Amino acid sequence: MNEEKLWFLADLNPKQRAVCTSDKNTILIACPGSGKTRTLTYRLAFLSIMYTESNNLNIAITYTNRASEEIRNRLLSFNIDLTKIWAGTIHQFCLEFIIRPYSMYSKRISRGYRIIDEFVQKRYVREICEQLQIRLGYNENPFAYPEIVKEYKRRLKENKEIDFDIILDLSFELLNNNAFIRHNLSNILRSIHVDEYQDTNDLQYKILGLIARENNRIRYFFIGDVNQAIYGGIGGIAKSKTELDEICGANFEVEQLDGCYRSSQRVIDFYSKFQVASSVISSESNLKDELGIITHNKIIDKDDIPEKIATIVKEQLALGVPENEICIIAPQWTLLYPISKSLRELLPNVGFDAPDVTPIKYDPMNVFYLICKLKFSVAGKNTSMRKRTANEIITILTEDYKIHLPNYVDCYFILKCINSAEVCDEDGIETLKNTVDILCSSCAIDLNQEDYLKKTYTDFIDKVNQRIANYSLSADMNAFKRCFQEKSGVVINSYHGVKGEEYTTVIAFGLLNGLIPNWDLIYNKNNKEKRITETQKLLYVVCSRSKKNLYLFSEQGRTTRKGDVLTPTDELISSYSMFDLD
Ligand SMILES: Nc1ncnc2c1ncn2[C@@H]1O[C@H](COP(=O)(O)OP(=O)(O)OP(=O)(O)O)[C@@H](O)[C@H]1O
């Protein structure tokens, strides 16, 4: 009877279908474009259809919010009921399934806590450096100083604050110290899928292992590609079968997918030169025999980059390539913001899905960010997102800040309050303040009695003001609305941000020693091997996003702060001696 509902399995090749419907703990390792994400997404759909009677959840842990959003959208397009599927990052998983429901069992957070963001973290580091009289060098990592770490941790503890690392530490502690939490949690799960598992760190594996060992009926699915392990610097590691067997107390099958459905053979042959674990990849794409364009320009001046890229974009559009099939990539946000601005000026009729410097920064775990999202996006559109966001606001207030809300407060009430707040066209901050005032008074929240919430509010307003001042931004309602407008068009993103994505034409610039690889890897002369492999993996990720065309730039004229000239990335130059570039 389910067969009709499983129509989508026909879109998989036999190997993908076997993996998708398998009931074994599986490690799926395969090359870019081989359909790992497709197999994972279809597996979630398969499980939710096969086990309609059960309430147990199927979990997908992704590296980014963008990836989990894409999985959810794909499933919705199949009309899959999402109630038994959960997709999000490991931090969201820990927060939702461990920290929030069990915070009363941790002395540190039992009376409430607030999650701090990068803005507050940077402020603390600045204050601590002043206090300890430490002068940090340019780009130096403050957390390499044990005395800074000690004082930072002390402050957070004293203020009942947690950061992203502490979310993981506390989750591990709660699970490790409390058998009943492991028991309760593992009994509501059917399966856990970890996408891009090569980027998982030791503590994250341990958390997953504690859950797995408690209940061997949960099926685990680790999906990844060792050649794309670009987070080694922050502890990401692809564990072997033996290690995963040990961590999860289970027996894993190792499976592989063959062929690449994304890229032409020419693109594959080019990026294969950056493999650290070699394998032969053959194209299964309908673009298989396309030659496309693969080029590396080392003579262009940095000031000519915007015009040159604008010309390529125009040519591609004229050839019929859709806007969202073109992607421009750079290694740093400091390069991405100016190129976005220049391209918008040079190509006023082209749409861009590009990073903008806006008054409000993306921060979905901050309750005031969520209030802004509802106030500054269009009411009446995307009702399910609005209801979800309003519910999330209630959850954060009650479970993180431990605020007792009156019984009448539900998502509709929150939406009504936010919609009714007075708008001040010239001043987004004033509008936000009106919204927070009405929300607090209607929900019986006295901000003066709620220290943590008030601190988060003050920090949020400070951060917005600082961004407006630092980047000379407009502060009117339109500027605030732009933060939440959906963008579409030519994609502009970072080298790390494009992981998992695919485009007909990829244009990458900033391929320079000092950026790719970064200075940390260059200075570390003892570890030449690491420098080479880390750089190769980044180049592999970037180039394997392309279906057909690849324009690479190592522009001239970029220098260090001292004025030393940045030269083209060595690993890129050495790789194409055997390859005929255009
Ligand atoms: N069996 C198939 N038939 C046709 N197209 C497929 C098949 N499997 C995957 N694809 C298509 O190939 C492309 C790449 O798939 P997917 O993104 O799942 O690969 P991936 O292995 O996750 O890649 P990456 O490692 O780069 O993230 C997508 O456009 C997908 O729809």
Image (tube, helix red, strand yellow):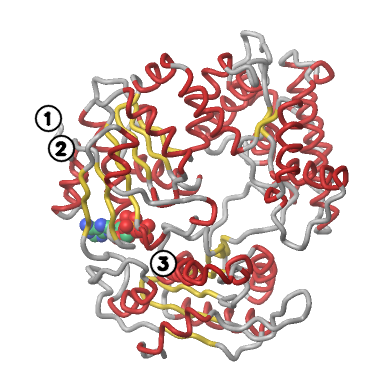
The residue closer to the viewer here, 358 or 90, is 90
- Residue 98: x %, y % from top left: 49, 24
- Residue 368: x %, y % from top left: 70, 33
Q: With 338 as the anchor, is 178 left or right in this view?
A: left
User: SS for tag 1?
Assistant: loop
**Residue at 61% over, 83% down:** 567
**Residue at 87% over, 49% down:** 133
In the image, residue 277 above or below residue 269: above
Marks 3 and 2 sit apart, C-alpha to C-alpha, by 34 Å
In the image, residue 108 above or below residue 334: above
What amino acid type should be assigned to the residue bearing mark 3? Arg
The residue closer to the viewer here, 187 or 504, is 187
User: Does residue 419 appear in the picture of this structure?
Assistant: no
Residue 1's disc is 1
In the picture of the structure, the residue carrying the numbered disc 2 is 4
Ligand 1 shows up in which quadrant of the image? Answer: bottom left
Circle 2: is it few (<14), some (14-19), or many (20+) Cα within 10 Å?
Answer: few
Marks 1 and 2 sit apart, C-alpha to C-alpha, by 7 Å
Q: Do the numbered discs 1 and 2 sit on residues whose CB atoms are within 8 Å?
A: yes
In the picture of the structure, the residue carrying the numbered disc 3 is 545
Mark 3 or mark 2, which has the lower sequence index? 2
- Residue 76: x %, y % from top left: 36, 40
In the image, residue 74 above or below residue 185: below
User: Does residue 59 appear in the picture of this structure?
Assistant: yes
The yes-or-no answer for disc 3 within 8 Å of ligand 1 is yes
In the image, residue 170 above or below residue 308: above
Q: Do the numbered discs 3 and 1 sit on residues whose CB atoms are within 8 Å?
A: no
